[in-house]
Amino acid sequence: MDEYNDWRFNDRRSAKKIRSIKDFFSRILPVDPRNRQVVKISGIVLGSIFLLVFCVFLYFAKDLPNSTSVSKRFVAESTKIYDRTGDHILYEIHGEEKRTTINFQEMPEGIRYATITLEDQDFYNHHGIKFSSIFRAAVKDVLHRQVSQGGSTITQQFVKNSLLSGEKTFARKIKEVILSIELETKFSKDEILGMYLNEIPYGSNAYGIEAASQTFFGKPARDLTLDESALLASLPKAPTYYSPYGSHPEDLKTRQEFTLDRMAELGYITKEQAQAAKGVDVFSKIKEYREDIQAPHFVMFVKEYLESNYGQQMIEQGGLKVYTTLDWDKQQAAEKAVREGADKNAKQYRAGNASLVAVDPKNGQILAMVGSKDYFKESEPAGCTPGKNCVFEPNVNVAVRERQPGSSFKPYVYLTAFEKGYTPETLLWDVDTEFDQGNGQSYNPKNYDGKNHGLLKMKDALAMSLNVPAVKTLYLAGVKNSINTAKSMGITSLNYPADRYGLSLVLGGGEVKLIDHVGAFGTLATGGIRHKETPILRIEDGKGEVMEEYQSDSGERVIDQKYVSMIDYILSTNDLRAPVFGDKNPLSFNDRQVAAKTGTTNEWRDGWTIGYTPYLVAGVWAGNNDNSPMAQGADGIFVAAPIWRSFMDEALKNYNKEDFPKYEQEDTGKDVLDGKMDMTEEVKVCKIPGKKDGYCLANDSCPDKEQVKKKFFSGHTLLWYVNKDDPRSDTPKNPENDPQFKNWEAAVQEWAKKENYDNGSAPKDACKESDFKKFQPTVSISSPSDGDTINNSHLNIKISGSAGFGVKKTLVSVDSKQIASKGDDSFEVTYDIPEEKWSDSMDIEVKLTDKADNTVSDKITVDNNIVATP
């Protein structure tokens, strides 16, 4: 403390060591040298006393510990967990005692002199003991018949606390005196005072001035002010009674002010300094009483790692300094985003909790971890209602718990498909499809928006997070292959056999940890290079020697960058997701490339958003710890994405813009993989009469007028064109052999029918004459018959015919004069025979023309023998 630089102890080294027994006793019992008889008698008495004392000391000295080793003895120290800069202590791990040993030079003069003022004002003048104090204490002990009074110097207190037991006996008191004198001969006053201040108890499990300063004021001892030093120096007399968290703060303040006044009287400070320090509201500086822990879930994550690797005793007593990877500013931003976002979710979506993890993808270092919205909040009751907070367990670190990831798992599946030979342009049918699960049961997934979108490219299906195409992609990629891809990227769960998960895996049918999920997306951020997540930068032991240190490495390439760039492109292109999520959504950034994917599980139990840039990856989970459903519509885009976006906006402020490697579309030579496929085909055909939806390729076998150009639906399921396990090989000759082909193809054709496309595919066969022979028109005059004699002037003519193509017109004529025209092939017509024909013959003819312009006819001749009626 600079304000104390002018403090000095002029008599600090003034004391001389005792040179002889005579000199020693002359100091404690001066006599008049002129009275030689008295001197002689006194000498004998004192010599006897000295001899007795020497024998007593010799008796007890044989069992005393070595005072020389006091500075080398093991002193339990707390393990300190810091952020990456070392400027912020996140937590002290300790057993019964929190302790941090510091050098004497780091102890401000204020705490040194305040301690001396209260505990031992003659510290720099005596030789470890004060006989007057010992004699006074001994008399009182004898009178009370018990050892209760101390009269101890700072040296004696240190010996008692560090080298001896706490028993109150005369024997222990004698040992204390012997060791105190011996200690003073081997260590300087400053060394003794420093050791004392490093071990004295201050209450609240804080041992030593550094632990006390951190516990009560949240800062290093070297930064203590005069008012704070006086307050801390007041605690050791009765740490519980005088505790700032206790019931007697007014007594503590009185003792602090007494200390300041006494320091001024002794010349350590001025009266003005004492008055100014007394006027400070020192209690307003006291930290809130609770377990002093920052970034609590991250700290517990680190503590678990330390216990696993170094053991509980080491971390509680070894004085380790653990420098973590935590970025303090990002942690603050993460906690704020989670806290505010979770509060909004609780009111709007009945989502009681949220968690966030951020990682540097270039090295795997964990930059922020928020395991729940409030580590210190008491658990809230189940059965939440809208407008109230919902179920969550504050101490549970959701970031390391397994939860279903919903659609946020899809990128692993599509990545596996791309590795297999499929492309972002590969065409898939998003149509209502039954999937054969191979166990006699079918699976019928539905899309987020409840609609089907027809023919799509894989990139559109992934960006819009459509479920039906995703399940198809999983089948094409393979469940086991997709799990292997996810594991290679950092997922540590999904350890059951692949058939246990089935095709629902792509929709979140398995479970993953948020920290793994973020790390795996970090592998995407680096172009396919995996860096294992780590919370540790460096660990030092109590002596400052490095026990463990992060070593930079090049990571492990697990995915070819070529395929990762496909995912980067899809997840960072807002135009691709806009048809479902809208142009303005939390995943859209105007000023930099950011890739992101949301996820929602069945019944809205989990909401996710994971996103990354080349230099930062972060993920958010939102939901309820007990897996109870959120409100309907609590999709990841609504409950997790706003929290993620809030964090990213703050965290990305200090990063330069960096783009992902550019995706270059390749020509595979297969139209269906390159996104080139027409759903309709225009062909010149003839309709085959009598055959429903039957056509043949037009030629001379069908009438010219029956030949038309017609568009047919030509779409097929992807399995029609590719072998799923080798999509770039030849088109399969028997696609129906694939177990999913039947259902997939039927779903495509059914969709075409509902969309009013012409049913069926274009004909492959040319027209044949036989296709039309039985459909050629026929016609005849069934009554009267040829050669009949007609006796009645009212003639009924019956026509019988057929027309496979349909009747265009049927004409009936008598003696070349048309008497009827019909659109039917069979009918009757009555003809009134003119009188001039009553005794003559007539020619009756019928001609039928079908709609293919084919014409047939029949002709008869009849005789008339009609007699006039009188």
Image (cartoon, helix red, strand yellow):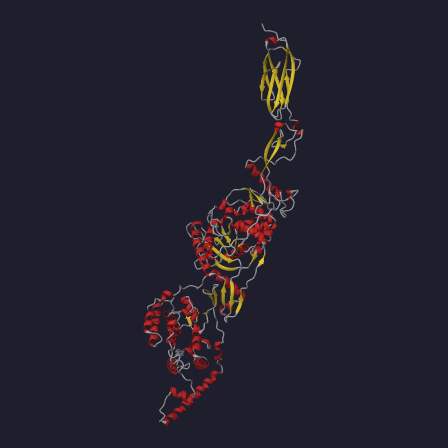
Q: Position of residue 61 (x, y in %)?
A: 47, 83
Q: Quadrant of the N terminus?
A: bottom left
| Numbered marks: total | 0
Q: Which quadrant holds residue 772?
A: top right
Q: Among all residues in the image, which is located at the extreme top?
A: 870
Q: Quadrant of the C terminus?
A: top right
Q: Position of residue 232 (x, y in %)?
A: 39, 70
Indicate whether 156 appears above or below 253: below
Work out whether residue 337 can be spotted: yes
Q: Position of residue 404 (x, y in %)?
A: 52, 52
Indicate whether 132 appears above or below 828: below
Work out whether residue 203 can be spotted: no
Left or right: residue 869 compared with residue 352 = right
The front one of 833 and 426 is 426
Q: Which quadrant holds residue 183?
A: bottom left
The front one of 37 and 848 is 848
Left or right: residue 253 compared with residue 199 = left
The front one of 27 and 390 is 27
Q: Position of residue 824 (x, y in %)?
A: 59, 22
Indicate whether 506 appears above or below 544: above
